[in-house]
Amino acid sequence: MIRVQVYGVLLSAVMAMSLSTGLPAHAEVAGLPAAADPAARGAAIAAENDKRDKGWGDARADMKMVLTNASGETSERALQFMMLENPDAGDGNWSLMTFDLPRDIEGTALLTYSHAKDADDQWLYLPAVKRVKRISSSNKAGAFVGSEFAFEDFSTQQMSKFDYTWLRDEPCDDRTCHVIERKPLYEASGYTRELVWVDTTDYQFRKIDYYDRKDALLKTLSLTSYTLYENKFWRPLELTMTNHESGKATKLIWTAYKFHTGLTKDDFTTASLERAR
């Protein structure tokens, strides 16, 4: 899932979606814990979502970032994205995102090592000063290069980083979704909780509501245009993050996905940041 995995989504992203568990492309899951035990049911839904994010190895994609301000004016950025599945199943995956356009941020790159329990490691390369800057845990809630995505939104959303509670099942677009609440367990998160819509057929993220440190609805991430690659790997080709406080939005549009391209650990080091452009 993109687990910005953004995804991920992302990841959640970040955030990144994959399906290689031997299940058919559209397979509902039987035997979830009863609604009378919402914590167990929520954790089981999250576990199924997590289980389907295995086996993709490595991947590359192109990405366009479209920023929209409160007046409706837009600007665009072009990026390249590389991802590597960590062979250590107990830890998180790695990603490297590099800006190609516009010229004033060309070569800017973000390297992320996601971790299952510890704080994620992130480094930002700034070509203007030719310096690699480590992103501290206290800064992960900050906006990433002027977008509506925070640094933490580009980390793999490891299951062990949250507590889960199932709230309800309800229609979402043309299907039904489980709605679960997850609360971050890691320090310095910018969110007190997130409401996540996971479809009951493919167990992919469809929407995430983010609540700020005052427990007010801050942002909503919508994940659309899902495409199945190689009959295994689900990817949402459009992710839109809307900021309810500022009226701004950022859309990520993904193209040219390629899997098993031969990427290795050597492509995801702090030294690789300077040669990523």
Image (cartoon, grey):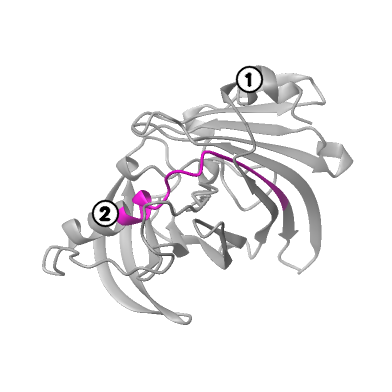
| Gap between marks 2 and 1 measured at Cα | 34 Å
* Relative vertical location of residue 245 with respect to residue 133 in this rendering, above or below: below
The answer to whether residue 156 is left or right of residue 198 is right
Instruction: Tell whether position 106 is magenta.
Output: no
Q: Which residue is mark 2?
A: 164
* The label number, if any, that marks residue 270 in the structure image: 1
Nearer the observer, 166 or 193: 166
- The residue at 52%/60% (across/down) is 231
Amino acid bearing label 1: Thr
Q: Quadrant of residue 145?
A: top right
* Relative vertical location of residue 239 with respect to residue 191 in this rendering, above or below: below
Q: Position of residue 243 (x, y in %)?
A: 58, 61
Question: Which quadrant is home to the C terminus?
Answer: top right
Camera-near label (2 vs 1) is 1
Do the residues bearing badges 2 and 1 touch, measured as CB atoms within 8 Å?
A: no
* Relative vertical location of residue 120 with respect to residue 238 in this rendering, above or below: above
- The residue at 83%/44% (across/down) is 101
Amino acid bearing label 2: Tyr
Residues in magenta, as a range: 48-63
Q: Provide the secondary structure element on which disc 2 rests.
A: strand
How packed mark 1 is, by other alpha carbons closer than 10 Å (few <14, some 14-19, many 20 or more), is some
